[in-house]
Image: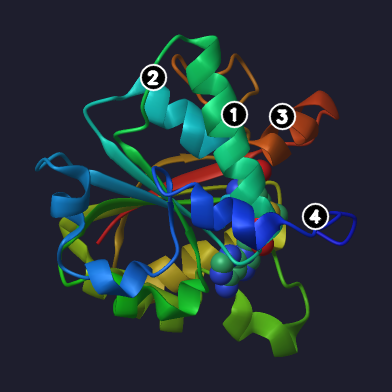
Amino acid sequence: MGRLRRRSDTLEFLANAKDVVVLEPQIHKGKWRKVFGNDNPIHVELGMGKGKFISEMSLKYPEINFIGIDLYDELVRKASEKSYALREEHGVSDIDNLRLLLMNIEKIEEVFDENEIDQIYLNFSDPWPKKRHASRRLTHSNFLKKYRQVLKVEGEIHLKTDSVSLFEFSLNSFADMDLKMKNISLDLHREETPENHVFTEYEEKFVEQGVRIHRCEVIL
Ligand SMILES: C[S@@+](CC[C@H](N)C(=O)[O-])C[C@H]1O[C@@H](n2cnc3c(N)ncnc32)[C@H](O)[C@@H]1O
């Protein structure tokens, strides 16, 4: 996100956006259902970027609780602005089923308890193509072990990527852990976009350029 300009009041913005931004997520470990005030399933997007996907999903599926995570404060701000704008557009006053966290995915087990998450989305994660950076890929076994800890039994990871190398690496990584895979596609939008599909920002750009999108769902 090199070109992203950071506004000087971003931390203040985040501190004031308490209805959607959670700045100290670790205090809610094991208590996320309390944060949402219900027992609905919890779906988490790791690396949400500007938040188009997670905020559209939260509007479309009010019976699911969504959590978007990103490493950069300016992106968490953009994601909250996006969700405020969407709610206004649709005449929905509050944001009950969406929370946005500014944190490093490496610390996921400090923020969620065992079995606390129902589903994880990995959308267009950074491919880290150099071999020496393999352990930074979000489907590296070190990350998968962490996800397995916080996902409930039979919880799922839904992955979409334009990167052939990351996709191949991920399939191998899932296979090495004996994970069940389903709904694999090497060209998700080839015939027609799946019904009810929610595009991410990156996906929208890639599809416009005719780049193929790879998709895989994994059961842990
Ligand atoms: C290529 S972007 C994809 C954004 C969005 N999911 C989409 O599809 O449009 C990857 C995002 O992951 C975030 N990210 C990468 N590594 C991360 C980490 N360790 N913890 C939190 N966020 C991370 C980046 O900041 C970036 O916003």
Under tag 3, what secondary structure? helix
Residue that mark 4 sits on: 7
**Where is residue 154, by image quadrant?**
bottom left
Q: Is residue 160 left or right of residue 33?
A: right
Does the residue at mark 2 contact the one at mark 3 (Cβ under 8 Å)?
A: no
Q: Is residue 71 left or right of residue 217?
A: right
Q: Earlier in the sequence, mark 4 or mark 2?
A: 4
Q: Earlier in the sequence, mark 1 or mark 3?
A: 1
Q: Is residue 38 left or right of residue 203?
A: left
Q: Earlier in the sequence, mark 2 or mark 1?
A: 2
Amino acid tagged 4: Arg
Residue that mark 1 sits on: 199
**Up-down relation of residue 1 to residue 51 (above or below):** below
In whole angstroms, how far apart are the C-alphas of marks 2 and 3?
27 Å
In whole angstroms, how far apart are the C-alphas of marks 4 and 3?
25 Å
Between disc 1 and disc 4, the foreground one is 4
Does the residue at mark 1 contact the one at mark 3 (Cβ under 8 Å)?
A: yes
Residue 44 vs residue 172, the one in the foreground = 44
Between disc 2 and disc 1, the foreground one is 2
Residue 79 vs residue 54, the one in the foreground = 79
Q: Position of residue 28 (x, y in %)?
A: 24, 66
Q: Earlier in the sequence, mark 1 or mark 4?
A: 4
Q: Residue at x 58, y 84 (%)?
A: 135
Question: Which residue is at the far right?
Answer: 3
Residue that mark 2 sits on: 93
Q: Earlier in the sequence, mark 4 or mark 3?
A: 4
Residue 125 visible from this viewpoint: no
Q: Residue at x 36, y 26 (%)?
A: 94
Residue that mark 3 sits on: 204
